[in-house]
Image: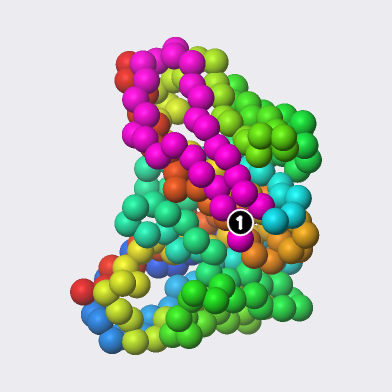
Amino acid sequence: DTAVSQTPKYLVTQMGNDKSIKCEQNLGHDTMYWYKQDSKKFLKIMFSYNNKELIINETVPNRFSPKSPDKAHLNLHINSLELGDSAVYFCASSQAMTGTETQYFGPGTRLLVL
Amino acid sequence: GNSVTQMEGPVTLSEEAFLTINCTYTATGYPSLFWYVQYPGEGLQLLLKATKADDKGSNKGFEATYRKETTSFHLEKGSVQVSDSAVYFCALSERSGGGADGLTFGKGTHLIIQP
């Protein structure tokens, strides 16, 4: 069973388009996250979310918006895609948000903006 | 703010060699510390973690000890295998912030083990 899954695995699109990446976890976790990994492999948190609050990294452009239809899903919507958005996006989840839990990562979505 | 510094590599070793990957951190509060591993084309997997000072995390022959006095969490393995070739990330999570800031990662160390 896949614990954290993401679709699609690869996404190639044109500048200016709007796209979504889906994330689902079957671990029963309360908290989900989105991370961005750039071309140099550097990982940075974009969002943290549980059923009570959304925490947004202040450096994330407002073209990016997370949407959670239920506790098991946290989708990432990106409007007006730019070349600099090309990266690998990872979804993760954890049992809670106290800072000591293990985060479980999805396989990543490789986004290429042309 | 919080930060994690680790050697970037690539680090190239022969099979059965001893491995050390250094990791030091800066945190405003009392962090939990993690090592994650990323194999080619895959997501990140937890390798080990420690949540308080002097704790030792261990898994698959890898070890790291939370050293508050030196703000370090160095990763070690006594005898590496070709299958250990991957990118290793040191990370911290700030408990005082409720973990809402997610993990702060180092830049990753690319480890290459040659037969």
Residue type beneath disc 1: Asn
Report which residue position mark 1 lands on: B2
Toward the left, the furthest residue is: A114
Vertical placement of residue A76 versus B79, above or below: below
x%, y% of residue B103? 60, 56
Residue at 49% from the left image edge and 74% from the top image edge: A59
Residue at 59% from the left image edge and 76% from the top image edge: A56
- Specify whether residue B13 is painted magenta: yes
Residue at 70% from the left image edge and 56% from the top image edge: B28
Which residues, given as a range, are shown in magenta?
B1-27
**Residue A41 shows in this picture:** yes
x%, y% of residue B63? 63, 26
Locate residue B10: give its quadrant. top left
x%, y% of residue B41? 37, 48
Q: Mark 1 lies on which chain?
A: B
Residue at 51% from the left image edge and 44% from the top image edge: B5
In this rendering, position of residue A55 left or right of residue A45? right
Toward the front, the furthest residue is: B69
In this rendering, position of residue B30 left or right of residue A61? right
Q: Alpha-carbon neighbours of circle 1 within 10 Å: few (<14), some, or many (≥20)?
A: some
The C terminus of chain A lies in quadrant: bottom left
